[in-house]
Structures are given as structure tokens and as C-alpha cells.
Image (cartoon, helix red, strand yellow):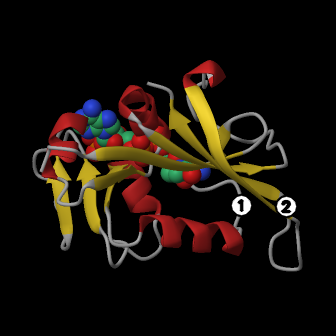
Amino acid sequence: MSEKQSIHAIVAIDENGAIGRQGGLLCHLPVDMRHFKQVTMGHSIVMGRKTFESFPRRPLPGRQNIVITRNARWQHEGVTVAHSLAEAIQAAQTPDVFIIGGAQVYEQALPLVDVLHLTVIHARWASADVFFPPLKMDEWEEVEREHHASDSRNAYELDFITLKRRR
Ligand SMILES: NC(=O)c1ccc[n+]([C@@H]2O[C@H](COP(=O)([O-])OP(=O)(O)OC[C@H]3O[C@@H](n4cnc5c(N)ncnc54)[C@H](OP(=O)(O)O)[C@@H]3O)[C@@H](O)[C@H]2O)c1
């Protein structure tokens, strides 16, 4: 598949642009997990091998899981393996392709991204060790924003923000 594909990225960042620490996410936010599932369900999702291996249950159901690795022998049941970002996007079987991380893959994919689904968590983690690449805000138009207050299950307030690349 390659004609008329839209490339999306989806990511949760803190106020410093951090996305993870010690191989995992910054925090557990059920409201963001639900949002991620809703946005990506039914589509192809592209991820780095480290992000795939950080999932407790893998692959993620209801989506074509495409994992990028340089290891020619790496494979996993239910996963489409690719050895470059271009190969991963080429292998995607849905018109909307979602880049779901991690930092290495976001860095390479950002120039190709048409729509960015950002969750901004209103907190900062000093222990963070992976970051989203810096965004040039004049390249993006905000098309949606939804605020969520913290509650008994979600310790931090957050915003779901959708940005479209200006063409
Ligand atoms: N907050 C969020 O929304 C979010 C989302 C996703 C991930 N994360 C976090 O991000 C962290 C993981 O990110 P990361 O940057 O360490 O790893 P990553 O991007 O998930 O995976 C990196 C791996 O992908 C493969 N890879 C990358 N570029 C490649 C290329 N051009 N060609 C072939 N293979 C390529 C390599 O696998 P091999 O080593 O097998 O060759 C590389 O080691 C974790 O902490 C995770 O929890 C956060």
C-alpha cells in the first residue's frame, strides 16, 4: 500500500517533551490508554523493536503491528517485521498508518507525519531518559483540543491535541 496513505503519529509527552524512562512509559493513565486504543484501532501501527518489547501483552489486538528492527533474524507471531522506516510504511495495509514510537522512530518519522495526536501530560519527570523531537509550531495547525482533569484513576491532568501539518 502506498497511494494516498496518511501518516499519523501518536505520542504522550510531558511538559518537557519527555516520553519515557527506563524502557517504559512515564506513568499509567487509563484515560490515555483508552484514547490511544480508540485512535489507532483498525489501523496499521509502526513501532521500534524496543517499544514493542515494552508492551506487557503483545502484539496489540485489532491492528496490524509492524515492528522495525535491524536484526535480520528477529520475528514474532502476529507481527509484520520491517528493516527500515520506509519498508514499514510500505508494508502497511491500511490508508492511515500510525507511528507509535519510541524516540528513535519518532525522530526518523516526524518529517513524514501529516497528523500528530499529542497527549500533553501536565507534569515533568526528572528521571525521563527519552524525548520526542522538538516541534516547530509554525509547521502545524491545531485542529482539536480536549482537556481532562485528573481524577482517582488518572493522577495528572492532560490535553489531547490534534495537529495537522500545514502544507
Ligand atoms: N510516551 C509515548 O507515547 C511513548 C510511545 C512509545 C514508546 N515510548 C517509550 O519510548 C522508549 C523506547 O524508545 P527508544 O527510542 O528507546 O526505542 P524504539 O524507537 O522503540 O526502538 C528502537 C529500535 O528500533 C529499531 N530501529 C530504529 N530505527 C531503525 C531503522 N531505521 N531501521 C531498522 N531498525 C530500526 C532498532 O531495533 P534493533 O535494536 O532490534 O535493531 C532500535 O534499537 C520506551 O521508554 C517507551 O516506553 C513512549
- Please name the amino acid that badge 2 sits on: Tyr
Contact check, label 1 and label 2, Cβ < 8 Å: yes
The local crowd at label 2, few if under 14, some if 14 to 19, many if 20 or more residues have their Cα within 10 Å, is some
Q: Nearer the viewer, residue 4 or 78?
A: 4
The disc label shown at residue 156, or none: 2
Report which quarter residue 18 is drawn in: top right
Determine if residue 122 is in view.
yes
* Label 1 within 8 A of ligand 1 by Cβ: no
Depth check, front residue: 141 or 98: 141
Q: Is residue 74 left or right of residue 109?
A: left
Residue 134 lies in what quarter of the image?
top right
Residue that label 1 marks: 27
Inspect the image, locate mark 1, and give the three-letter code of the amino acid beneath it: Cys
**Label 1: which secondary element:** loop
110 shown above or below 32: above
Residue at x 38%, y 59% (from the top left corner) = 52
Relative placement, left or right, of 28 versus 116 is right
Quadrant of the rendering where the C terminus is positioned: top left
